[in-house]
Image (spheres, grey):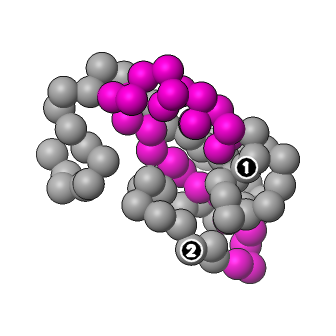
Amino acid sequence: MPDHPNLFLDRSLSIAFVATCPPRQCGIATFSSDLEQALKATDESVLIQWAAINEATSIHPYGPHVRWRIRQGILTVTEPRPSI
């Protein structure tokens, strides 16, 4: 198991948010942060980790709750190769 300060085996619920995250200032980041606080107020043992979405041109100073960073941008989908 990876060594991370927020990982404990005795947690009853583990949640990952894939969203913008404070300190980025936008409505989704504010909503997600409020949702995180409400979940923790309901159950202090819940493990909440973040995959924070960054703008392509900036990096925000996140705390240890952010495990992953995703650079916002254009998703490129490639077509499968035709069978011969």
Residue 41 higher or lower than 73, as above or below? above
**Front in this rendered view, residue 56 or 43:** 43
Residue 36 in view: yes
Q: Position of residue 82 (x, y in %)?
A: 63, 41
What residue is shown at x 65% (from left), y 54% (from top)? 21
Mark 1, secondary structure of its residue: helix
What is the CA distance from the residue labelled 1 to the residue labelled 2?
Answer: 14 Å
What residue is shown at x 73% (from left), y 72% (from top)? 56
Q: Position of residue 69 (x, y in %)?
A: 54, 61
Q: Which numbered circle lies on residue 61? A: 2
Q: Which residue is mark 1?
A: 29
Residue 73 belongs to the span the image colors magenta: no
Q: Residues within 10 Å of mark 2 (few under 14, many from 20)?
A: few
Residue 38 higher or lower than 77, as above or below? above
Task: Look at label 1 and name its amino acid.
Answer: Ala
Q: Position of residue 2 (x, y in %)?
A: 19, 52
Q: Which numbered circle lies on residue 3? A: none
What residue span does the magenta drawing correspond to?
32-58
**Which residue, as the protein is rendered here, is positioned at the far bottom?**
57
Residue 35 belongs to the span the image colors magenta: yes
User: From the viewer's perspective, is 71 left or right of 9?
Assistant: right
**Front in this rendered view, residue 38 or 13:** 38
